[in-house]
C-alpha cells in the first residue's frame, strides 16, 4: 500500500477534514504503539508499512535489548495518543482503532496477530475494535 492510499483510508474512515489530520493520527498512534510493543516486533511491523508511516513506529521504539516496550494500560495508551494528536481521549480512542485497522490491511502474514498478542487485554480490545467498533 502506498503512503497516500494509507493516509486516504485513515482520513476517510476517521472522517477527518484533510490528510494532515490523518498523518497526525497515524503518527500519534504508531509512536505510542512503538513505545508499547517489543522492539523487534515494531521493526517487523514498520518494514511492512509505507516508509513514512513505518518511521513513526521506529521513532519511539525501545532499543538496546530492553526486551519488551513500556508497560502501560489502555487509559495511558489513549492519553498518549490524545496528547500527540491534539484531540480529546474519546476521539483518540477512535483514531487509534482506525489507524490500526488500516495497518492491519496494509500488512501481510500474521504480524498484526503478533502485535495484538503482545498487548495487554484492555489495549487489545481497544485496537481490534476497528473503525466501526
Image (cartoon, rainbow, N blue to C red):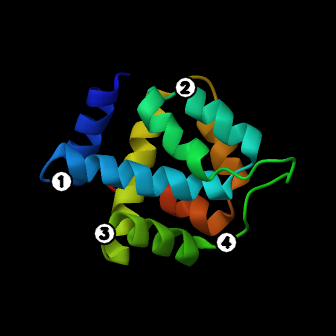
Residue placed under numbered mark 4 in the picture: 72
**Is the Cβ of the residue at disc 1 closer than 8 Å to that at disc 3?**
no
Q: Residues within 10 Å of mark 1 (few under 14, many from 20)?
A: some
Q: Position of residue 116 (x, y in %)?
A: 63, 49
Residue placed under numbered mark 2 in the picture: 48
Q: Position of residue 98 (x, y in %)?
A: 36, 50
Residue placed under numbered mark 3 in the picture: 91
Q: Pick whichever, 117 or 51, lies toward us.
A: 51
Residue at 35% over, 54% down: 25
**Is the Cβ of the residue at disc 3 closer than 8 Å to that at disc 4?**
no
Q: CA distance from mark 1 to mark 3?
A: 11 Å
**If you read the primary sequence from the N terminus, does the residue marked by circle 1 or circle 4 appear first?**
1
Q: Residues within 10 Å of mark 3 (few under 14, many from 20)?
A: some
Secondary structure beneath dot 2 equals loop
Secondary structure beneath dot 4 equals loop
Please tell me the numbered disc located at residue 16.
1
Amino acid at each position: 500500500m502506498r503512503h497516500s492510499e494509507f493516509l486516504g483510508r485513515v482520513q476517510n474512515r476517521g472522517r477527518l477534514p484533510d490528510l494532515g489530520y490523518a498523518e497526525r493520527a497515524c503518527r500519534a498512534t504508531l509512536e505510542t504503539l512503538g513505545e508499547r510493543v517489543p522492539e523487534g516486533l515494531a521493526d517487523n511491523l514498520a518494514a511492512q508499512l509505507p516508509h513514512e508511516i513505518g518511521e513513526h513506529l521506529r521513532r519511539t521504539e525501545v532499543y538496546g535489548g530492553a526486551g519488551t516496550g513500556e508497560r502501560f494500560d489502555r487509559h495511558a495508551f489513549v492519553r498518549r495518543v490524545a496528547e500527540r494528536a491534539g484531540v480529546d481521549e474519546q476521539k483518540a480512542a477512535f483514531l487509534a482503532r482506525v489507524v490500526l485497522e488500516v495497518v492491519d490491511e496494509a500488512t501481510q502474514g500474521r504480524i498484526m496477530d503478533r502485535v495484538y498478542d503482545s498487548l495487554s487485554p484492555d489495549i487489545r480490545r481497544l485496537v481490534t475494535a476497528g473503525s466501526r467498533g
